[in-house]
Every structure is written in structure tokens, then in C-alpha cells.
Image (cartoon, rainbow, N blue to C red):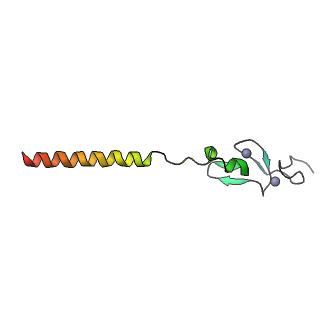
């Protein structure tokens, strides 16, 4: 037998490596995420998960504010 054993199972061959910590992982240890293959410890670490869009509500409020401004400007232009 040749190859690198799984970091968690010495009797199993590694199929891939964790993209977070570089550990060798067998088929039952690897966790496939959108950004690559990870060990379970890294897959549960929020920093390494696919990044979620942050500040989305802030952006929504920005657009809501712009919409209100446009409506107010339109109403004012109709008044005069
Ligand atoms: Zn890892
Ligand atoms: Zn394993």
C-alpha cells in the first residue's frame, strides 16, 4: 500500500486534502463545500464556509431611501 493515510483514520488512504488546514482526508472524513474540500473541523468553522452576503439589509435600506427620495422629489415637482 502506498499513499498518505487519512489524518483521522490511519488505516485508510487519503483521497483529498483539507483546503483549510491541509490535513489528509479519507472519503468519509472529507466535507465538500462550495469553496473546496474540508475536514469536519474546518467545515464547521464559519470563516472557511462560503461567504454569505453581509450588509444585505443595509443595502436594501439604502435603495429604500433612494426610492423615497425619488418619490419625494417627484411629489415636490408635481406641487410646483
Ligand atoms: Zn481542516
Ligand atoms: Zn478518515
| 27 to the left or right of 37 | right
The residue furthest left is: 80
At 35% from the left edge and 47% from the top edge, which residue is drawn? Answer: 61
Viewer-proximal residue, 32 or 66? 66
At 70% from the left edge and 54% from the top edge, which residue is drawn? Answer: 31
Q: Position of residue 6 (x, y in %)?
A: 83, 50
Q: How many marks?
A: 0
Q: Quadrant of ligand 1?
A: top right
| 44 to the left or right of 77 | right
Q: Position of residue 77 (x, y in %)?
A: 11, 45
At 62% from the left edge and 43% from the top edge, which residue is drawn? Answer: 47
The residue furthest right is: 1
Q: Position of residue 58 (x, y in %)?
A: 40, 45
Q: Position of residue 67 (x, y in %)?
A: 27, 49
Quadrant in which residue 69 is drawn: top left
| 80 to the left or right of 16 | left
Q: Quadrant of the C terminus?
A: top left
The residue furthest top is: 21
Amino acid at each position: 500500500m502506498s499513499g498518505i493515510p487519512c489524518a483521522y483514520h490511519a488505516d485508510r488512504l487519503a483521497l483529498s486534502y483539507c483546503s483549510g488546514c491541509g490535513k489528509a482526508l479519507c472519503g468519509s472524513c472529507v466535507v465538500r463545500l462550495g469553496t473546496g474540500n474540508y475536514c469536519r473541523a474546518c467545515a464547521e468553522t464559519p470563516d472557511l464556509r462560503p461567504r454569505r452576503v453581509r450588509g444585505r439589509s443595509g443595502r436594501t435600506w439604502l435603495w429604500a431611501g433612494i426610492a423615497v427620495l425619488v418619490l419625494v422629489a417627484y411629489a415636490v415637482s408635481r406641487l410646483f
